Amino acid sequence: MVAAGVYLIARVYPLMQAGAQLGGTTTALTVVTWVGASTAVFAALIAVAQNDIKRILAYSTISQLGYMMAGLGMGGVAVGMFHLITHAFFKALLFMGAGSVIHGCHEEQDIRKMGGLKAEMPLTFATYAVGMLALCGFPLLFSGFWSKDGILEAAQHWSVAKGPFYMLVFGALLTAFYMTRQVAYVFFGQRRGSTPAHESPKAMTAPLAILAFFAVALGFIGTPAWPWFRAFLEGRAAGFDLHAFSEPGLKGLMATSTMVVFLGLGLGWWIYGGKSPKPGELDAMERSAPMIWGWLRDRLYVDEFYGATVVAFYGWWARVADWVDRRVWGGLVTGVAWSFRGWAQLNRFLDNNWVDGSFDKGCEELSAGGGLLARMQTGRVQAYLRWLALAVVALVAILIWSSRA
Amino acid sequence: MSGFPILTLLTVLPVVGAAVALWSGRHARNVALITTLASLTLALVVWIRLPVDGSIGLVEQAAWAPSLGIEYHLGVDALGALMLVLSAIVTLMSVDAAHRVHHQPGLYFCLVLVLEAGLFGTFTALNFYHWFLFWELSLVPAFFLIKLWGGAKRGPAATQFFVYTMAGSVALLVSFLAVFLSTGSMDFVHLSLLASTGELEQMVTAHLGPVMLWLAVGVLAGFAVKVPMVPFHTWLPNAYAEAPSPVTMLLTGAMSKMGVYGLLRIAIPLFGPQIAQMRTPLLALAVATVVMGAWAAVAQKDLKRVFAYMSVNHLGYCLLGIFALATPAAGAAAEASQAAALNGVILQMFNHGVTAAALFWFVAMIQTRTGGHRGIDDFGGLRKPAPVLVGLMGIALFSSLGLPGLNGFVGEFLIFRGVFPLAWVAATVSILGLLVTAAVILTVIQKVFTGPVREHLATFPDLHHGERLALAPVIGVIFLLGLVPQLVVDSLNPTVMNLLAHWRF
């Protein structure tokens, strides 16, 4: 699955190459190269100090993906894709071998608690060794040698800078070193587990054997003498030509690469060969450079870096978004609602005290007047008659007064 | 008026159903089911009988109050018809989901059907008066559905929802009155024609002075609240969370589309140049809706509020597409991008409607099974006791995330395809929203579905056959439109081209 990214770069290679002069390169490809070479070294360094059998392989995969990217950047599609194909087989072999080891050791993944498994798991050991040698790029026989050499060759001829070449050579040294460390811990030395290990069933070892075959055989479709794979990708027939080996610089490169591999294997064996660290004992490298070892063991703090930047920002910004929603926008809405409510209260006050107040005052006076009249409406006929008589008298008096003339 | 008045029938049908439901007590849900099924059938008939050239068809026209510019004028193009189908689907889903209404079921389903009638009326009306009537009418049942059957804080939530939307509507109304005073018309088709020649602006300016921009702002305000657009969205999480989940399905699935529909039917056709003038700030708000909506979802602890903010985020993509295409840029490339964006916006409306309604349906199921739990931290390991529910809900969640092959992807893809060439900065920043939504959804999956099984979930019952049967068509639509979007796009594209041909920016 992880190869998908490499494949994508290969697929969009024409885009990456757009605008390149003949024999030149583009900024995009230069970036791909540097990123690839740095990844190769960075991940290989981390792989040196890991103790989980699968974690070592995982960092190794990242490192090899870096090689593929660098190969794409400097050598083109065929170089990168060839390493992708060979790596797919030997890395699958290694991961399945690791699975077989873990199964045989009762779900133990810590290489410090294994050891001496080559006697108990001979088939797994043999196939794992093939995968490991292919990954290290053991000369001539193994596929990893040919595909990695293709990349190194491209790096050697790269016109922009020589840095990637040296980085990739250093990466090859580290690869051989950490794989030797792993194999030495897992398969050599004394058995350190509490329960005896057992070889895995055929269902597990048979695929290992098949993959081991390809981890060797695939190399031969991409040698300089018979570059069938490159020809296949470029859509032409491949010719067999042993003279290709006598191209200037190629033999020197193969010799360098071989030396680097042997140096890595030798260093690894010298430090870790036949050692059986007791539980709790420090790693041989850890004793000599504890600080650097600590950095590498803690994976150069990449996870911590992302945790402190991206993840922290993600959570913090989520709280900000929520806060802005609740306090600022929600607050504005509430503020508007409250101001409306305040306005309503003010209206009520004005209504009650001024508008209604004066109206009520008028009503009070009216009802007071009404009360006066009501007192006159006593319901007694005699009283009404008295008023009537008085009124008649008054009317008559007015009549007389007015007709006096 | 020509032919059979199918659109009138479509709107009347739920009203009749509502009247029957009101008096049928505990059989109300069956009445509602029959009504919504019949409505869906009718809506599909409308969809099939659309004119092939993308123009407005099935027109019904009758005098109402001619002196006031009021006319009974109905008609739909693919945009309106798709919204009719969506409303019918979502209402059917909502009725299906509401099988535990014990308190006054007659009234409940009556209100749901009135709401459906309001939606149908809004999506078919071509006269402002008529349209506004239904636009407001749909608020009333929604208010009572939240107020009477909602959660603990239903009172304030319902009031805020109602008043906030009303405030937006008032701004909209004032703008439209100004347009009416200047032109003497309330007819969308007529006004769009006037606007496309630039006459509308001349008439308004001649009558009222240079106020066209302010009228555009008023209309936008009305729709911005309804969609909603940041910062006019704060009513939404409360309303969605406090409403009973089947009502939330209606709110997010159908009612939120009224705002986007209004932008496409009214705001853009009439106020294209003004919106193009305000494009940059509007795009900024659309991006804020996408990005802040997604991030606010991260901070929520209540599943319903998480999905509510995700709705804000998803409708933000619609806003992004609409505002990005409001540009006077000419040329074949720009027109292709505008067409892609508009197709995407309309598809997104439909897809979000189905997916969001499905998500709230699942929340409703989880709630009834756990006695009301819906905190994101209340769950864990749900996939052990309820693999079918988790599987189907997972499909809906991934559709919401925009996984290729599911319906959610298609609309978002087309929107980004269209927006990127037209407004690449806005598109790029909005990608953050996609990323964060994905993180939110994966967090929900992780916290609710996986992990050790919580004690109170050990006896959690999985979906029974009835529920599986009810959900199957929804999941079917999610896959169907994800895999064969041309089923809709082929009918939609003529309308899109027709709309774009008449819009002027």
Image (cartoon, coloured by chain):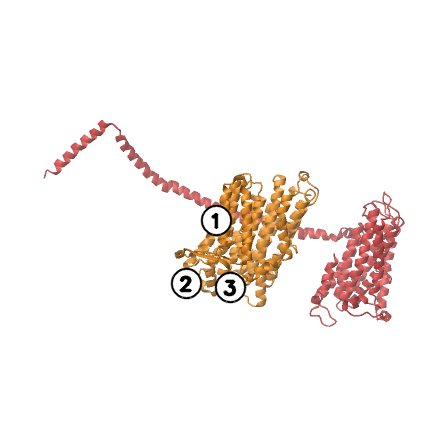
Mark 3 touches mark 2? (CB < 8 Å): no
Q: Which of marks 1 and 3 is nearer the N terminus?
A: 1
Give the crowd class for mark 1: few <14, some 14-19, many >=20 residues within 10 Å.
some
**In this picture, residue A119 sits left or right of residue A109:** right
Outermost residue, left side = A405
Q: Name the residue under label 2.
A: B206
Q: Which chain did the image draw in orange?
A: B
Whether residue B229 is visible, yes or no, is no
Give the crowd class for mark 3: few <14, some 14-19, many >=20 residues within 10 Å.
few
Q: Is mark 3 on a helix, strand or loop?
A: helix
Q: Dot 1 falls on which chain?
A: B
Whether residue B462 is visible, yes or no, is yes
Q: Dot 3 falls on which chain?
A: B
- What number of labels is visible? 3
Q: Compared with residue A305, is residue A221 higher up or lower down, i.e. above or below?
A: below
**In this picture, residue B328 sits left or right of residue B184:** right
Amino acid beneath label 3: His
Q: Colour of chain A?
A: red
x, y percentage for residue A62?
Answer: 76, 57
Marks 3 and 2, how far apart at CA: 23 Å
Residue B137, numbered label: 1
Residue B502, numbered label: 3
Amino acid beneath label 1: Leu
